[in-house]
Image (tube, helix red, strand yellow):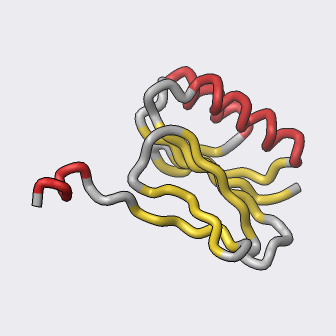
Amino acid sequence: MSFLVVVTENVPPRLRGRLALWLLEVRAGVYIGDVSRRTREMIWQQLSEGCEDGNVVMAWASRHESGYEFQTLGSNRRMPVDFDGLRLVAFRPPPDATAL
């Protein structure tokens, strides 16, 4: 079992309802829980199939150096990057930044 956090933006209500079956929604679109690897993978499959035009980040406790892992779905300014084996987050420039 490991601690899991899922943050959703602009996902369909039916997906939010499905997440509530396994996790506790502590704020709008923010879900937490303590789940097995198998359940985490099943939740990710549900997210992948139901995300539509929204975006999702899922983070969980692990034995990596950082103590966590995460993965994302959908379009967002924040994008995961690998930096010498450590996963970090980089920011894309805002869409209007090229106009400057």
Q: Nearer the viewer, residue 24 or 19?
A: 19
Nearer to us in this view, 77 or 5: 77
Q: Quadrant of the N terminus?
A: bottom right
Instruction: From the viewer's perspective, tell me whether residue 1 is left or right of residue 79.
Output: right
| Image side of residue 96 versus residue 48, left or right | left
Residue 67 pos. (x, y %):
76, 73
Q: Nearer the viewer, residue 48 or 35?
A: 48
Q: Is residue 48 above or below residue 77?
A: above
Residue 36 placement (x, y as % from top left): 88, 48
- The number of numbered badges drawn on the structure is 0
> Horizontally, is 77 left or right of 18 in the view?
left
Q: Position of residue 51 (x, y in %)?
A: 54, 29
Q: Is residue 93 above or below residue 76?
A: below
User: What residue is rendered at 47% in x and 65% in y?
Assistant: 90
The image shows residue 44, relative to residue 98, as above or below, that is above
Residue found at x 73% / y 67%: 68
> In the figure, 94 relative to 46: above or below?
below
Spot the residue most to the left.
100
At x 50% / y 24%, what residue is drawn?
Answer: 52
The quarter in which the C terminus is drawn is bottom left
Percent of width and height locating residue 93: 30, 59
Q: Residue at x 69, y 28 (%)?
A: 46
Is 16 left or right of 38, judged from the image as shown? left
